[in-house]
Image (cartoon, rainbow, N blue to C red):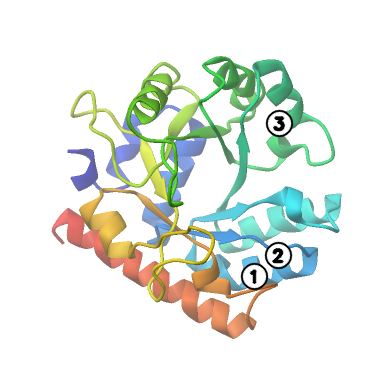
Amino acid sequence: MIATKTYGTRVSGHSNPAAIALLELMERKRTNLCVSVDVTKKESLLRIVDAAGPSVCLVKTHIDIVEDFDEDLVDQLAELSKKHDFMIFEDRKFADIGNTVVLQYSRGVHRIASWSHITNAHPVPGPGIVKGLASVGLPLGRGLLLLAEMSSAGCLATGTYTAQAIEMARENRDFVIGFIAMKRPQPASPEEDFLILTPGVGLDAKGDNMGQQYKSPREVILRNGSDVIIVGRGIYGKGEGAESDVIRREAERYRVEGWNAYQERLGQ
């Protein structure tokens, strides 16, 4: 089973450069933690990323909520990714027809494809959304995650919808590298390998007043077979973020919990 193989040995099961780079990074850095940074100020975003960076494999952004976005923010994010050895995942959740997502991905103010190693999309528009995004992302060595499931209460991405998302990914293995999902789906074969990134991970809280539901790193990695835990407020706190020392401490706490669960999964 894929879930019992090391991240490093799984590299051979992928052809996409972003997937290969992420697996190699996780093995090298001994982390399966993605920090989700949802703040509205450039200074806050960079400060949180700099503090959490040493403990993470991915930094997940919602760049469209940053009120003072500019090109310098992108440049500084890129520098921090080199400094701390992490990749960037823009949580754009594309959900439009192929021609529109081509423009959303490559143009406009944010020009996401130029700096984000990985992005994601809802499969609801059909395969045209993957074709459109791939036309921009593949030449740049980018990777795409499909939203097969979400962590919010009452989410409609279940059952047949999830199954169709998985089939869409299987038909586009060169660009679709995995899923946002709550657990590893049943593979079509023992060799089938998709990266599974799971949001809604928390050590101290079970949910919030807007429908978010939290699971522990151990439950997500060991029991559900996911590869990467996505943690936001559990690391940086509320608003524009806690003090940097607190963020560093919490990021490392989640890194250790996630990595220990992964090693237990491997039987080490």
Give the CA separation, mark 3 to mark 2.
21 Å
Q: Is the C-beta separation of discs 1 and 3 under 8 Å?
A: no
- Percent across and percent down for residue 60 are 58, 53
Q: Is residue 254 left or right of residue 259?
A: right
Please rate how many residues cluster around mark 2, counting C-alpha atoms within 10 Å: few if below 14, some from 14 to 19, many from 20: many
Circle 1 — which element? helix
Mark 1 belongs to which amino acid?
Ile
Q: Is residue 134 left or right of residue 22?
A: right
Q: Is residue 154 above or below residue 173?
A: below
Residue sitting at x 34%, y 25%: 160
Give the CA separation, mark 1 to mark 3.
25 Å
- Quadrant in the picture for residue 52: bottom right
Q: Is the C-beta separation of discs 1 and 2 under 8 Å?
A: yes
Mark 2 belongs to which amino acid?
Leu
Residue sitting at x 69%, y 25%: 101
Please rate how many residues cluster around mark 3, counting C-alpha atoms within 10 Å: few if below 14, some from 14 to 19, many from 20: many
* Residue assigned mark 2: 45
- Percent across and percent down for residue 138 are 59, 24
Circle 2 — which element? helix
Q: Which mark is residue 105?
A: 3
Q: Nearer the viewer, residue 11 or 47?
A: 47
Quadrant position of the N terminus in the picture: top left
Q: Of the residues under marks 3 and 2, which one precedes in the sequence?
A: 2
* Residue assigned mark 1: 48
Circle 3 — which element? helix
- Percent across and percent down for residue 132 are 63, 18
- Quadrant in the picture for residue 256: bottom left
